[in-house]
Image (tube, rainbow, N blue to C red):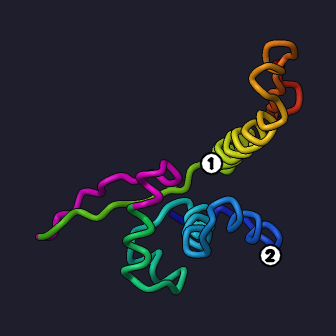
Amino acid sequence: MGRTGIRIDKPTEKAVCEILKSRARSRIYLYLLRKNGAKTEQIIKGTHLHPSTVRETLSQMHDQHLICRKKLKNDNIGKNPYIYRAIPPIKLLKGYAREIEDRLNKLASLAFSSEDAEKYRPVRIRICERGEEE
């Protein structure tokens, strides 16, 4: 769980915050990306977020498939902690691109009445990676 050497500048932090729609989510995501995984207590210390905020946000992010978690074996009495890892940035971007596509296509569909849709081919906006075929 050491540093991965990832350096993240302010514009990148801002972009991640816009994608995740939350400062807490972006701080947790970027912390996990930098550390290549961490336990809840490490995330709390590393992000300087309130413990309840971190726990709630981790649960939401896991449910939304923004992070992965794996149960660690613990020889001590008590609960076994999870180690959390961020999904790869490319996967995050692809999900965001699909979200933007959906919004743009909904907006584009407003330009056509049901009669126009029969006459014209409806607009379909798709964001592709370089070299990706349609």
Q: Position of residue 3 (x, y in %)?
A: 61, 67
Which residue is at a point 54% across and 80% down the rendered structure image? 47
Q: Name the residue type under label 1.
A: Pro
Of 84 and 14, the residue lying toward us: 14
Identify the magenta region.
60-77
Asked if marks 1 and 2 touch (Cβ < 8 Å), the reply is no
> Which residue was labeled with disc 1?
88
Which residue is at the front of the view, 124 or 72? 124
Q: Earlier in the sequence, mark 1 or mark 2?
A: 2
Q: Residue at x 82, y 32 (%)?
A: 125
Q: Secondary structure at mark 2?
A: helix
The residue lying at 78 percent from left, 66 percent from top is 12
Dot 1 falls on a residue whose secondary structure is loop
Q: Can residue 3 be seen here?
A: no
Residue tagged 2 = 10
Q: Is 130 located above or below residue 43 in the figure? A: above
- Count residues near mark 2 (Cα–Cα under 10 Å), then give few for <14, some for 14-19, many for 20+: few
How far across and down, in percent of the image, does residue 86 sit? 55, 56
Residue in front for this viewpoint, 107 or 116: 116
- In percent of width and height, residue 103 lies at 72, 44
Q: Residue at x 24, y 57 (%)?
A: 73
